[in-house]
Each structure stands twice: as structure tokens, then as C-alpha cells.
Image (cartoon, rainbow, N blue to C red):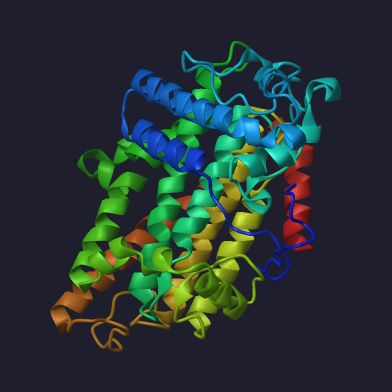
Amino acid sequence: ATCNDDRVANGRWLISNHWHCTVAIMVLSKMIKLAVAMSSRGTAMASFAAAEEHLRMASMEDADTSATTMGDASSSASDGNMPPMDHDGSMNNMEHDGMMSGTAGAMDPKDQHSHHDNDMQQQHGIDPMLAGCGPALHLNASYHYGLINEEMHAGMAIEFTGNPEYDFLAGMIPHHTAAWRMCEVYNHDVATSSTVEVNPGIESLCYNITYGPVDYGVDQYDFSQPGETEQMKDVLRSLGMLEQYEDNACAELSDQERDMYSTMSGHGNMFMGCGELDHDMTRDYIAANMKMHGYMALNFTGNPHVDFLLGMIPHHEGAIDMCNIYYNYWACAPSTGVCWNFNPLKGLKSDISGIEAVTIMGAMQHICTGHILYTQPTEVEWMKKELKKIAPGALADYEAMQSA
């Protein structure tokens, strides 16, 4: 079900790959974020096209230096290894050639060109442990899902403080961002296909993720993941820690310092964050994050519905795990309800009054109990049922991996 089955054990990876990103990936990342932020699908597609143009230009610059290992650049561009977008913003129809109705959607092996997959992913900066694998790795959507997984991983490698609220929020903000970006990839993949129709259930799920459930009326946006992201930043501001989050001290570390923290976290060369690593809460978060990222590096099938579900199921499960970890350490533990007789908030740089602390606890409970633990277990259950209907073998593999 994923590409890291032999490395996922008790939520830990043993990884030997070096973390690196290219200029092309950084440019593409900025353009994708711009596209996701725009409400119009047509505008977003135009921005994706602009992103592809930046990536194409960067690839042409790289081609001269990589010709000896990658082969002729023109043949690589035409054989389907890495064609992120056509210049009009649409995906190549070759992405959906060979789709099989009612199956996992595997494509004919003669059309896979999979012998260059790892080289292409590494050339464009995605760590193979986060990029995924499988016969459809070369497809545009697979590439963007791998990119989102890697960027989410980088965003969740935070400066751990030992403060339960900060450490949860700093990790959950990039986690939320990844969800609606995955929906953008899915919507774009289906919208530009001449052979695949949108799945109404996934379309509804993505609408709720991006805009919030219509049934919530005036509170609809508050229950969307972009809306909750704003709420989480408000809580960080109340904690006096928003600037710390935005400064992201871990991003300023030297390679030697990153290697040191990677060793301290027990995950080889995979950087998991800095700061208070010798803390039970930190270890719990890192284990949950590694498990989620490992499951999201999936074995791509080429079926847009299957690949989206295989990525979003562990993404949702990761959010549930993070809330359960938070409640183990928050000021009202072991209760999951807001309390008045709470433990002092830890790891803060400024004093918080009792009333302010209760307000913060209420906001945190809204995010976890009021949304994530209220809606996402039901959504996971639905996604698994839908995956079983579309590709029962894929669900069986995923559940077997989880129980191993």
C-alpha cells in the first residue's frame, strides 16, 4: 500500500537519504500555493500552468549537467516521466490512458517508463521516502502529492518547545494546508481528464475541507481547514508565540546542526525538528508524524480517486493521533474537557492570566474535539468504504500494513 512498509515500525523510519530541495521545487512550491489560494478553478489552473513553465525552464537548465545520467532531455520529456502540465494548464491525456473501470486503475506496463522514476524525483528535489513509488509515480498528480507530502513534512519539523498548545498548533497548521492542497490536485486531475469523472463523495469531502460544511450556516468557514488555520494562528498570537512560529528557527540551522538533531530524534538523516526533543510529548508527535508521512508515500496507481483516498486516509488519521497526543499533555489532562483548575501552561515566553488560559483551552478544544475528533473519524470511515468499493485490494493492503 505504501513504499516504506519495511521502514514503518512503531511509527519510526530508519532513513539514509539526504534532505535536499532544488531551486525548481522552491519556485513550483510558491506557484502552487498561489494557485490553491485562488477560489476560481480556472484561475488556479492558469497558475499551475505558470508553475509548470518555471519548472520546465529549470529542468532545461539542469539537462545539460545531467545528460550523462538521465539520457537525452528531449526523450525524457516526451516519454511521460515528468510532464507536470501542458502549457495550457491541462494534464497530458496520457495520464489516464489504460484506466480500468472498477479497479485500482493500474496502467499498461509498456506505458509506465518507470525505470527513470527515482531519478526524476531526485532530480526535482523530492526525497524518495516521501515521493512514493509504483507504476504511476511519473504522473503529474503523483508528483504533486509527493511534493505536498514533503513540504508538509518540512513544515511539521518544528522547533519543539514543550508547550502542548504551541507544539500542536505549529504542526497542525502545515498539516491543514496539505489537506486543501491535496484537494486542489485531485480537482485539477479530474477536471482536466477526458476519461475520469469526479467522485461526488470526494468532491463533497474536499468542499468541506476547503470551505466548510454548508450545514454549519454562518459558521461554515470557521469549520473549513483554511478557517481553522486562521483560528490556530489567533491562538498562537494569544500565547505570544506567533512570531516564534513565523520565524521558524529550525529553518535557519546549519547542515551540521540538522544532522545533530536528526541523530537526537533517532531517525537517521531525516530531520524531524529541533528544540526540546528529549520530551515524551515530542517523541509522541514525531512517531505519529513519521507514521503518517510513511503511509502517505503511497504506491501510486494512476486512478485519481484511489490515489487521493490512499493519501487522505492516513492524513486524517494523523490529525486524530495529534489531537489524542495533545490531550495527553494539555493543561487539563487527563480530562479532554476545558477545566478551571488547570496546570500552569508550560514553555511560554510571556505570562498568561487564568481567564486567558481558559479561553485558549476553549479554542484548542474547539479545534480538536469540536472539529477533528468530531468529523474526521466519520470521514475516515467513509473514505475506507469508498476505497473498498473502488479498489478493495488497495484497502486490504493498507489495513494489512497498519496491523503489521
Task: Determine if residue 203 is in view.
Answer: yes
Total marks in image: 0
Q: Quadrant of the C terminus?
A: bottom right
Image quarter of residue 18: bottom right
Residue placed at 53% from the left, 49% from the top? 21
Q: Position of residue 1 (x, y in %)?
A: 75, 47
Residue placed at 22% from the left, 73% from the top? 239
- Looking at this view, is 151 or 214 the one in front? 151
- Looking at this view, is 383 or 215 the one in front? 383
Residue placed at 24% from the left, 65% from the top? 242
Task: Determine if residue 284 is in view.
Answer: no
Name the side, left or right, on which 39 lies relative to 16.
left
Tell which residue pokes out farthest to the right in this image: 110
Q: Position of residue 183 (x, y in %)?
A: 47, 35
Name the side, left or right, on which 225 lies relative to 24.
left
- Looking at this view, is 355 or 281 the one in front? 281
Name the side, left or right, on which 56 lies relative to 400.
left
Image quarter of residue 8: bottom right
Q: Position of residue 170 (x, y in %)?
A: 37, 64
Decide: is 284 above or below 8: below
- Looking at this view, is 398 or 184 the one in front? 184
Residue placed at 59% from the left, 34% from the top? 62
Tell which residue pokes out farthest to the top in this image: 194
Decide: is 323 above or below 189: below
Decide: is 130 above or below 172: above
Q: Position of residue 208 (x, y in %)?
A: 39, 38
Decide: is 225 above or below 307: below
